[in-house]
Image: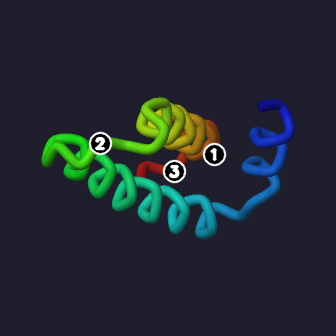
Amino acid sequence: MVREVRELREKSTEELIGELDRLRAELILLRSRSVAGGGLEKTAQIRNMRRRIARILTILRERGVKP
């Protein structure tokens, strides 16, 4: 986890915003798949993605950026 946070902090603000958009879109797809009854391969995938989004939002807020 520490490595992941360090890598996120090294990215530019534009890269973080791009990754945030990508993760949000992927989260929507995962949620729709789980609701549709398709099931997930790994049930913790949604939780991990939400946490990664939260980490990115925290870094952006520390930089004073409102996504």
Q: Which residue is mark 2?
A: 39
In-image side of 8 versus 39 (left or right):
right
Please, what secondary structure does the residue beneath circle 2 have? Answer: loop
- Horizontal and vertical percent for residue 29? 29, 57
State the CA–CA distance, disc 1 to disc 2.
37 Å
Q: CA distance from mark 3 to mark 2?
A: 36 Å
The location of residue 56, given as percent across then percent down, is 57, 44
Which residue lies under the disc numbered 1?
63
Q: Are marks 1 and 3 in contact (CB under 8 Å)?
A: yes
Label 1: element kind: loop
Residue neighbourhood size for the residue with mark 2, other residues' Cα within 10 Å, grouped as few (<14), some (14–19), many (≥20): few
Which image quarter holds the N terminus?
top right
Label 1: few (<14), some or many (≥20) within 10 Å? few
The residue that appears at 48% across and 38% down in the rendered structure is 42
- Marking on residue 65: 3
Residue occupying the point 63% across, 67% down: 15
Q: In the rendered structure, which amino acid carries the disc numbered 3?
A: Val
Up-down: is 15 above or below 40?
below
Seen at 76% across and 39% down, the residue is 5
Distance CA(mark 1)–CA(mark 3): 6 Å
Rendered location of residue 18, percent (x, y): 52, 68
Amino acid type indicated by mark 1: Arg
Secondary structure found at label 3? loop
Q: Quadrant of residue 34?
A: top left
The residue located at (43%, 49%) in the rendering is 66
User: Are the residues at dot 3 and dot 2 in contact (C-beta closer than 8 Å)?
Assistant: no
Residue 23 vs residue 62: left or right?
left
Query: Tag 3: Cα neighbours inside 10 Å, few (<14), some, or many (≥20)?
Result: few
